[in-house]
């Protein structure tokens, strides 16, 4: 099971960025994980993230992943099957396109 995300390439994103949203209880648990992150904040830009590997700190149903350094990505077309609104967890070596603010990024789950 992958626990790290490596950023491979980027392209500008020209669509809106609506993403799945956790409920209050889920957000409290996610926030607790994020508050414990001591990694310096990273800019969510291609220049700052190209070829970087970041650890997954928390996730919302396998769709939204919060990474160390304050970076979050959304899996827009997961290649792993899930159920009941959840995306299956990506195995190591899987490559997918994800949403990252104003960018679409190709990532590899490591």
Image: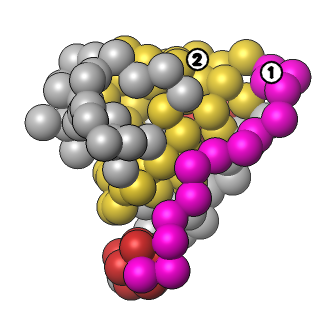
Determine the residue located farthest toward the front in the rendered image: 84
Q: Which residue is mark 1?
A: 12
Tag 1 secondary structure:
strand
Tag 2 secondary structure:
strand
Quadrant where the image shows the N terminus: top left
Determine the residue located farthest toward the right in the rendered image: 14
Q: Quadrant of residue 81?
A: top left
Q: In the image, what residue occupies the spot 64% across and 46% down?
A: 19
Q: Is residue 23 magenta?
A: yes
Q: Is residue 4 magenta?
A: no
Quadrant where the image shows the C terminus: top left
Q: Main secondary structure of the magenta part?
A: loop
Relative to 103, residue 23 above or below: below
Q: Which residues lie in the magenta part?
A: 12-25
Q: Which mark is residue 20?
A: none
Decide if residue 106 is in sight here: yes
Q: Residues within 10 Å of mark 1 (few under 14, many from 20)?
A: few
Q: In the image, what residue occupies the spot 73% across and 30% down?
A: 103
Closer to viewer: mark 1 or mark 2: 1
Q: Quadrant of residue 15?
A: top right
Q: Nearer the viewer, residue 86 or 74?
A: 86
Q: Which residue is mark 2?
A: 9
On the image, the x and y values in percent for residue 109 come to 30, 29
Relative to 108, residue 29 above or below: below
Q: Are marks 1 and 2 in contact (CB under 8 Å)?
A: no
For the residues marked 1 and 2, what is the alpha-carbon distance in whole angstroms? 11 Å
Q: Residues within 10 Å of mark 2 (few under 14, many from 20)?
A: some
Q: In the image, what residue occupies the spot 80% across and 21% down?
A: 12
Q: In the image, what residue occupies the spot 57% across and 49% down?
A: 20
On the image, the x and y values in percent for residue 22 come to 50, 64
Decide if residue 4 is in sight here: no
Q: Nearer the viewer, residue 40 or 110?
A: 110
């Amino acid at each position: 099971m992958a626990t790290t995300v490596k950023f491979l390439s980027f392209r500008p994103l020209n669509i809106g960025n609506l993403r799945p949203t956790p409920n209050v209880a889920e957000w409290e648990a996610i926030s607790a994980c994020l508050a414990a992150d001591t990694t310096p904040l990273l800019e969510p830009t291609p220049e700052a993230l190209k070829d970087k590997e970041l650890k997954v700190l928390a996730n919302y149903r396998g769709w939204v992943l919060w990474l160390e350094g304050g970076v979050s990505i959304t899996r827009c077309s997961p290649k792993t099957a899930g159920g009941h609104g959840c995306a299956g967890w990506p195995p190591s070596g899987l490559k997918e396109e994800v949403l990252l603010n104003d960018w679409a990024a190709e990532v590899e789950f490591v």
